Every structure is written in structure tokens, then in C-alpha cells.
Amino acid sequence: MTIGALRAAGVQLLRQHGVESPELDASLLLAHLLQKDRTWLVLNQDQIVESSVEKQYLSLISQRTAGLSVAYITGFKEFMGLEFSVNSAVLVPRPDTEILVEKALEWLNNKASYPSGPPKVLDLCTGSGCIGISLAYYHPELDLTLSDISKEALAVSKNNAERLFGAKRAASVRLVHSDLLDFFLHQHEQFDLIVSNPPYIPRRIIPDLPREVRQEPLLALDGGEDGLDLIRRLINGAQALLKDKGAIFIESDSEQILSIQELLKNNGFHAIESYPDLSGSLRCTRGSKLST
Ligand code: GLN
């Protein structure tokens, strides 16, 4: 069988099983199996593959039709142009989260926000580390702390820091096991920037999420009754954790934005702004701490 025919068979199977993006998923899985990129597949579609490859490919396709996401099958997900390793202990990085990284990078580009040396950045609920690691990748001088309540997630973020930065620089990335901001509040530690994509799905909605999302860790999704349990704790503690002029960027669902803006205002934040994701829904909110 040729590469083109094998891919076409994959597309057909995925389509029959109602997979949402059969063309893309069929290509991603085949490219992963052959250790090539998607362009290579197009350019080499007449090449014959061995029957062992056919078998392995159909096994990947059947994992996908059984409801596993491509990222969990391949163990990788692209985010901010970087390849993050993922497993079932972490949320798969979403394109919608890139807006938070982009806005935080804009904030970091204004050095007046952190006059005293390299900016200290904390990524809370880091999961795969995709937010904090992307910030440090595109803004190399920052001092990065990644934190999560899940030790398994911290192992994934450590692995990503090592893969994307190399061992030497990854050694300077601090990994902290903490229940949200508790560890840092006890240490009386302060940061210039806090970024977070905490669990924010209202509990009653979880059974109705797409099956791919339901395979992600509940710990990374469940935000309590209205989805705001962790965000409330985060905003209530954030003033103490930020230096003067410091800022916090929080991801949420668009329906939660007004409550979050209100919470930020009631906790003394100013310059509160929300930003839309790729589909135009507000996805991320910033608040800044006034200088005293
Ligand atoms: N955005 C994710 C989703 O739609 C949820 C992420 C989260 O709870 N932090 O499934």
C-alpha cells in the first residue's frame, strides 16, 4: 500500500466513527508513526510502506476512533510553535490558551512593569508547563517557577523544560509542588507576573464534555459548582503574591469573565482587561497591582 492510500483509509475510518477532523488526525497519526512531518507525507504519497507499518497505523487509528485524542496517542501537542510532551496526567494544551501567552509576552516586553532585574514569573496549575515554558522560551531572561498540585504533572513539565531548553537551562526552572498558591503564601514570596490556566469547568457540565476532554484529568478541569472555586482562591491570594506593578493573567470561560473582573476589582486590582480567543470569545483576564 502507498502512503497516500494508507492515509486515505485512515481518513475513511475516522470519518465513519464521527471523528471531528478526520483529515488532520489521519495525517498527524501517520506523520507521527513515520517520524516525519505532514508536508513530507504529501510529497511522498506514492511511496510504498511495509505491511507492519499498515498494521501499526490501523492500531493508532483504532485508538483514535475509541475516543483517545491525537495528543494522548502521539504523546505530543504543538503550542506556541513548540512541541510539548503530554500524558494523561495533564491537560492537552489548547490553541485558545495562546492568547494568554501572547498577552503576557506583551506585558513582559514593557520593562517598566518590573524595574528591578529579570522578571520573576509564576505559572500556577502549570500542567504540561506550556504557558510558563513558552513565556521563558520567547522571553529568555525570565526567572521561572512552575507549580502544580499534581506531582505527575510536575514530572511532565520538568520533561518539557529539559526538552525545550536543554538540561543546563532547565535546571534553573524551579518546580514547586503546591496546592494553588498555598506554598508561596507561606513563604511570603513575591512575583512580577502570575499566569494561570486553573480548572474552571462547572462541575455539572463535566459529564457533557466531548469524550476526548473527559479523558483529561478531572483535577485539571473541575472548578467546583460554578467553575470559579480555584479562580476565587487565586484572586483572593494574588495581591499578597505580587510585587508592586505586578500582574496576573487568568484563563477562564467567557461566561465567567464578568465575575472574574468583579473579583479582581474587589481585591484591589486595576487595569483590568479581558482578551478574546481564536473563536472571538473572551478567554483570558488581566489585573495589575497598584504601586504603593
Ligand atoms: N478550556 C478547557 C476546556 O474547554 C478547560 C481548561 C480548564 O478547565 N482549565 O475543556
Image (spheres, grey):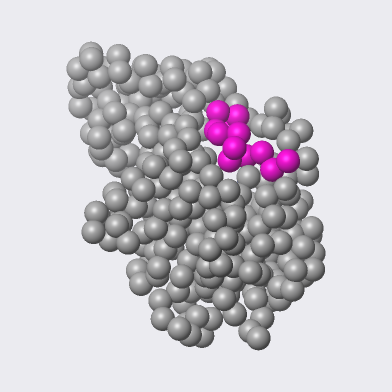
Magenta includes 25?
Answer: no
Front residue of 47/236: it is: 236
Give coordinates of residue 12: x percent, y percent: 46, 20
Q: Nearer the viewer, residue 179 or 268?
A: 179
The image quadrant that residue 85 belongs to is top left
Question: Where is 217 relative to 200, above or below?
Answer: above
Tell me if residue 109 can be seen.
Answer: yes
Left or right position of 103 against 222? left
Q: Quadrant of the C terminus?
A: bottom right
Residue 81 figure quarter: bottom left
Residue at the limit of the structure toward the front, as seen here: 186
Please say if 37 is above or below 138: above
**Residue in the image at 69% along x and 32% along y:** 206
* Quarter the N terminus occupies: top left
The residue at 66%/57% (across/down) is: 234
Which segment is the magenta one?
213-224
What residue do we see at 35% from left, 25% from top?
A: 7
Say whether residue 214 is magenta: yes
Image coordinates of residue 107 in percent, x first then y, are: 53, 74
The one of 31 and 269 positioned closer to us in this rendering: 269
Q: Residue 29 placed where, x, y %? A: 37, 30
Q: Position of residue 194 (x, y in %)?
A: 55, 64
Residue 106 visible in the shown view = no
Viewer-nearest residue: 106 or 119? 119
How many numbered marks have been drawn onto this rendered protein structure?
0
**Rendered view: 131 above or below 65:** below
Q: Residue at x 59, y 62 (%)?
A: 185
Above or below — where is 82 with respect to 242? above
